Amino acid sequence: MSSPARSGRERFFPESEIIVSKTDLKGRVTYANKTFCDIAGYAEAEVLGKPHSLIRHPDMPRAVFKLLWDTLEERKEIFAYVKNATKDGDFYWVFAHVTPSFGADGGVIGYHSNRRTPKRAAIERVIVPLYAKILAAEAQHKNGKEALAAGVECLTQNLAALKVSYEQFVLTV
């Protein structure tokens, strides 16, 4: 499935609504609520069974997703600011809370994500400039592994300069 041309238009959803999705262990969508489908512009049938990365926006640093997946692999929850893409090329920002889902035996069986409207000031003043800096570090490398490592290093250095963890950072901006 190819990505549509990016429109540059931002979409918004009401603060009273929560975007909810669930995935299996491979990141394929197993559930998407109406708000998810409405904001992303997909029918439920178009997302079920598809990789959640279907809504990944190219402005999102790979380093942030690495941190997200590393945290989930440790069986921990994570909060993150994420820029998502819509089916028709628009975008929308969310403040995501992603958690592992556990089965009766205590094993991880998938992932659950609730996304709320983000703080505008945080997006505009902090997140957009930081993510642009990380993306620039990633873009300096043609090799994907090196690009990811450069992005992780950039993110790590920025957090170290602020003397905070990523979790402290996103919960306080």
Image (cartoon, grey):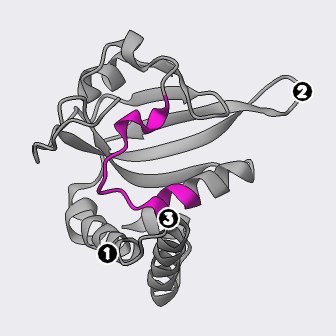
Q: Residues within 10 Å of mark 1 (few under 14, many from 20)?
A: some
Q: Secondary structure at mark 1?
A: helix
| Residue located at (54% from left, 64% from top) | 167
Q: Which residue does the numbered mark 2 point to in the structure image?
A: 105
* Above/below status of 146 relative to 51: below
Q: How many numbered marks, from 0 up?
A: 3
Which residue is the extreme one toward the top? 45
Residue interval drawn in magenta: 51-67
User: How many residues crowd mark 3 within 10 Å: few (<14), some (14–19), many (20+)?
Assistant: few
- Dot 2 lies on which element? loop
Q: Amino acid at mark 3?
A: Gly
From the viewer's perspective, tell me whether residue 33 is left or right of residue 38: right
The percent position of residue 152, horizontal first and vertical second, equals: 52, 73
For image coordinates 46% across by 89% down, the residue present is 161
- Residue 136's disc is 1
Residue 26's tag is: none
Residue 65 magenta-highlighted: yes
Q: Position of residue 69 (x, y in %)?
A: 61, 52
Mark 1 and mark 3 lie on one chain; the one further toward the N terminus is 1
The answer to which of marks 1 and 2 sits earlier in the sequence is: 2
User: Residue 144, percent across and down?
Assistant: 49, 65
Question: Looking at the image, which is closer to me, 59 or 93?
Answer: 59
